[in-house]
Amino acid sequence: MKDIREASFEELENFVVGCGEKKFRAKQIWDWLWKRGVASFQDMTNISAGFRETLAGNFTFHAAKVADEVVSGDKSVKFVIELHDGKAVEGVLIPQGDRVTACVSTQVGCPLNCAFCATGTMGFVRNLHYSEIVDEYLLLDRRAESIYGRKITNIVYMGMGEPLINVENTVKSVEMLTSQESFGLSPSRITISTAGVTNGIRTLADKDLRCGLAISLHSANPVVRREIMPVSKRNSLADLREALAYYHKKTGDRITVEYLLLSGVNDTEEDAEQLARFCRAFPVKINIIEYNPTENSSFIKSSVQDRERFINVLKRCNMVVNVRFSKGRDISAACGQLVKKRKD
Ligand code: SAH
């Protein structure tokens, strides 16, 4: 049986008419699914009980649910979201000033195996369907309202998985979240983060989604980057740079560069100079991220002195730099840590 949220509007219309119902029922069902974000046929209260049963007899409804949540001392909350097949992904809510940022996953597990990331150690399980990504937003938004009394203001695709390996569902989820026919969120408040899948970056550039792009660079040295991010073997730094320049050319957007400082790995003055050189091809904002230690990993975060020295080099090179202190460290909020703990 097909899941109802995998049906196009036309399919729904044909189904409804085929059942002898009025055509406008399709629009009603569509709005329940894609405007109100209900989690079951039962919630479609303007559809007769009889027709809801017909729907349930012909379509599945793959709803996700919050299976666990952990509150951090800094008020961020991490969620385990259980999907219809029992697989789990993570979502995080991060309140900051008048913002509430939701971090969503795009895959169960991840095939990229970045050396510092907990998700990579789980291997790849499956892609999320776009309705599951939308569900993460819907579930987290409800939780944000009850926890902080506010709705989500920003969404970052920085949970488990690589969005641009699941590019079709990623794109479709952004379209659903931002379409005026649907949830109507502002695309400028959505950021997709990639480890550097170059063809995916080009695909995004051609889509005109109007959302932001972040690249998890973590090293501008080809040898080091291949070592800590194996994705770089098939998506070379040179090609990445070209893809990002293309993205900028097509969208006019400044690109966010994420850089995780790892002691003795990527934090020398030379590394900073190399980073600044890499970023000359397009306008960037560099976010220096603090490493969140994961189990069985030998990396150590850079010292405050090394970090300051690194940032000073970037500033001397006229780069825009922010430091992002790790949020939710006490709740294992780094990519993949919570689901992994649960599995273990
Ligand atoms: N695959 C995408 C999105 C998921 S990872 C990407 O790579 O961008 C989201 C961010 O968390 C990435 O910048 C990633 O490099 C970073 N990250 C992973 N493990 C981390 C850790 N232990 N500490 C800090 N940041 C981490």
Image (spheres, rainbow, N blue to C red):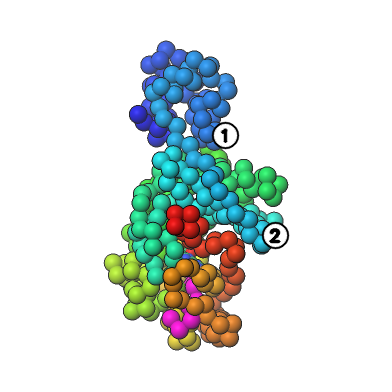
189 vs 97, left or right, is left
| Segment colored magenta | 257-265
Report the disc number at residue 310: none
Quadrant that contains the N terminus? top left
Residue type, label 2: Gly
Residue positioned 36% across, 64% down in the render: 113
Residue 267: percent from the left, percent from the top?
48, 82
Q: Please identify the quarter of the rendering in which residue 143 is found.
A: top right
Circle 2 packing at 10 Å, graded few (<14), some (14-19), many (20+), is: few
Circle 1 packing at 10 Å, graded few (<14), some (14-19), many (20+), is: some
Most extreme residue toward the front is 344
Residue 227: percent from the left, percent from the top?
34, 75
Residue hosting label 1: 36
Residue type, label 1: Arg
Q: Mark 1 near mark 2, Cβ–Cβ under 8 Å? A: no
Q: Does residue 301 show up magenta in the picture?
A: no
Residue 119 at least partly seen:
yes
